[in-house]
Amino acid sequence: MKKEQVFTILGGSVLLGLLMYRKQKRQQKPAQTLAKDNSLKAAVKNTVVSAKNLGPELKNTMGTIEEIKTEINQFTADIEPQLKKLTKDVEKFQK
């Protein structure tokens, strides 16, 4: 396994976790604001702002997921021949 691939996978996982954390914090913030001001106007405003932010956030998250999937597929393709060779070597050793 190459160090670059490991760091890429770990970095992608950390980035995805950070995006999900930020998304969760953004969802909690409007709820706290509504608790202070229960007026219908504040509720509508917070819902509209949250909906506007959701689209770009989803695009970013989906892009990150696609990048991670691509890296995993590339890693799997790179390691598959080595894994087959290792399996054959283990079989020879066991005989």
Image (cartoon, helix red, strand yellow):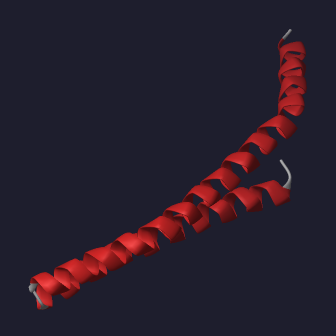
Name the residue rendered at 86%, 27% in the picture: 86
Q: Give residue 72's position: percent from left, percent from top.
A: 72, 45
Q: Give residue 43's position: percent from left, percent from top.
A: 18, 80
> Can you name the residue that lies furthest to the top here?
95
Q: To which quarter of the image does residue 11 belong?
A: bottom right
Q: How many marks?
A: 0
Determine whether, in the image, residue 81 is placed left or right of residue 75. right
Q: Give residue 37's position: percent from left, percent from top.
A: 12, 90
Q: To which quarter of the image does residue 48 belong?
A: bottom left
Choose between 44 and 28: the one closer to the eye. Answer: 44
18 shown above or below 68: below
Choose between 88 and 43: the one closer to the eye. Answer: 43
Q: To which quarter of the image does residue 33 belong?
A: bottom left
76 shown above or below 61: above
Determine whether, in the image, residue 43 is placed left or right of residue 94. left
Q: Give residue 18's position: percent from left, percent from top.
A: 52, 71
81 shown above or below 65: above
Name the residue rendered at 83%, 14% in the picture: 94
Name the residue rendered at 89%, 29% in the picture: 81
Determine whether, in the image, residue 68 is placed left or right of residue 60. right
Q: Quadrant of the C terminus?
A: top right
65 shown above or below 48: above
Choose between 86 and 50: the one closer to the eye. Answer: 50
